[in-house]
Amino acid sequence: MGKSHQDPQAGANNLLVNCIGVKPGETVLIIREREGIDYYDEGVPELVGQAAGDMGANVTTVCEPMLKGPEHVPDEISRGIQRADHTIFFSRIGDQIRFSKLEGGGTKTMCYALNLEYLGSEFCTVPHGLMDRILAKLEAEIDVAREWHITCPLGTDVRGEHDFEPPEPGTKSGFSLLNFPIGTFRPLSCKTMNGRVVVSRWLTPSGSHLYEPDHLIIDNPIAAIVKDGRITGFDGDSETVRKVEKHYHTVAGQLDINPDIVHSWHAGINGQTYYSDPPTENLWRWANLTFSSPRRLHFHTCGDYPPGEIAWSIYDQSVYFDSVLYWKDGRFVYLDREDLHALLDEFPTGAKALQMRTDIGV
């Protein structure tokens, strides 16, 4: 699919005004990765910082390296977050701490605009208020569901009971940070999950702790057998199974965690998600952006805490809540309902949320 119209300034305004609500005189702390890492285009935090300054905000930028894990946040970052009215992460540190309890009364936002193209595309310019209302409506329906069922073309077939647990006070949909753009709903527990998940292409990090190697290429699809939220074995090509089992034991050994747990899952709801680079050039980068795509659903595994350490991805999935279809073959058909169309009509550019890109590198 070709590039759409690009307007990075519109994306910055959607972030600063519609998502965060920056006002003149407020303080904005931008946390970015150190130069030379090449995960984020350095022009994105620069443009957003300039836009915030033009709004009358007082902007401070700090550059920080990756953390070993969410329990290793430096005091200087913690103090900065506590003092700021708004903190914006152009850094994977935001992903690492997205399930941690954070002090300070200001907003805290993880931005997934990796470069100016993403910031200016429909991925970041569909009105944040619209995506927020779609998410709230979806989660309200999930909250009262009794069970879920997931399938995929490769043979995934798993079910689980849904036991609603309200998010902790002060968090947004179970996350301690806002996500910009909105890409998914809060993870759902896999404690009662049973069935088969067919895993293909690769295993990727969940973005919590650093470990090596942080991914594994899967030569042939294999099936993970799950009983009551525990991996009981892998079925498939013996050499591929051996590599996967070794990877799990390597990661679990480095971090001293239980490798057999399937903790939770969620799927993408942002149809404008795309990925323009070869995924294998940086699978962490690919995984941390394409989780927003309706074509991808991922499970958090290896560790009894969110988000675990190893992610399984399935593609073009179908998802049912209480036998009602919400995703069909990787399309977020939930948006096809009349009540959702009425919601989209409230926003001048709301129809963009119905459009879908499929170019996520798989």
Image (cartoon, rainbow, N blue to C red):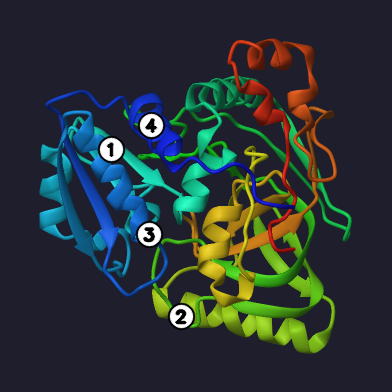
What label does residue 13 carry, if any? 4
Q: Amino acid at mark 3?
A: Arg
Q: Amino acid at mark 2?
A: Gly
Q: CA distance from mark 2 to mark 4?
A: 44 Å
Q: Is 42 left, or right, of 358 in this rendering?
A: left
Q: Position of residue 255 (x, y in %)?
A: 40, 74
Q: CA distance from mark 1 to mark 4?
A: 8 Å
Q: Nearer the viewer, mark 4 or mark 3?
A: 4
Residue pointed to by mark 3: 92
Can see residue 144? no
Q: For the point 59% across and 43% down, which residue is it?
A: 189
User: Which residue occupies the extreme bottom position in the image?
Assistant: 239
In this view, 258 is above or below 340 = below
Residue pointed to by mark 2: 253
Badge 2: how crowded within 10 Å, few (<14), some, or many (20+)?
few
Q: For the point 58% across and 38% down, which residue is it?
A: 122
